[in-house]
Amino acid sequence: MYNSNKIFIIGHSGAGKGVLAQALAKKLDWQFINADVMGCAGHIGRRLSDVIGNEGEKGMHECLADILSHQTTMNNIVVTTDESIIGSERARELLKTEFTVHLKVSIAVQVERLTGYRPLLPVNDITAFFDQLHNERDSLYESVASFSLSSDDGKIEQHTNMVIKALTKKI
């Protein structure tokens, strides 16, 4: 049984986590929370440069887990998480106790969405880079997910209804 007044959206960059979370929040009349790395400063008083510069990746994962821990105390929220939230064992354990949606995206769609939306860091082969991230993270996302769906078709309204239906079945 899951708490019926919280939804956490996890997945890779470009999956559409924010778009789905906003649609869910609007339909449910809940608060939308965008909890990504940039949220560290606003939620727990640390700048990104403080986290990455002084503590590296481990510090960033702890920051994200701290944010997530706080959010689990809230009600009537839909939270989109940073894609690297899954890197923390503490965060994974928290996500397992909540209604967590893994929003999947194929690498081809991910590349298409991200190259048109925001500048990407120069890498020799962006497809190989995303493939590596999928290999590292997909099984971790699945291990904590209460429900999974693919965002490749872009049908936000249909996805929103599917998540709400899955949430009501899990209560």
Image (cartoon, grey):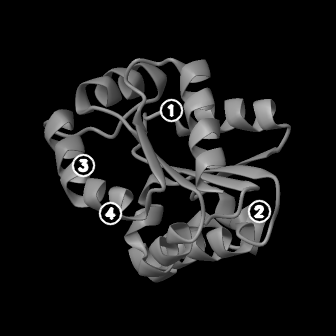
Residue at figure coordinates x 43%, y 75% from the top left = 88
**Distance of label 4 from label 3 (alpha carbons):** 10 Å
**Distance of label 1 from label 4 (alpha carbons):** 18 Å
Image coordinates of residue 102 in percent, x first then y, are 44, 48
Image quarter where the C terminus lies is bottom right
**Distance of label 4 from label 2 (alpha carbons):** 27 Å
Q: Could you tell me which secondary element the residue under label 3 belongs to? A: helix
Does the rendering let one see residue 53?
no
Q: Which residue is mark 4?
A: 140
Residue type at numbered disc 3: His
Q: Which one is in front, 135 or 39?
A: 135
Q: Earlier in the sequence, mark 3 or mark 1?
A: 1
Residue at figure coordinates x 63%, y 77% from the top left = 66
Image quarter where the N terminus lies is bottom right
Q: Earlier in the sequence, mark 2 or mark 1?
A: 1
Q: Which residue is mark 2?
A: 42
Does the rendering let one see residue 16?
yes
Whether pointer 4 and pointer 2 mark residues with C-beta atoms closer than 8 Å, the reply is no
Mark 2 against mark 3, which lies toward the viewer?
3
Q: Could you tell me which secondary element the residue under label 4 belongs to? A: helix
Q: Earlier in the sequence, mark 1 or mark 4?
A: 1
Residue type at numbered disc 1: Gly
Q: Which image quadrant is residue 135 in?
A: bottom left
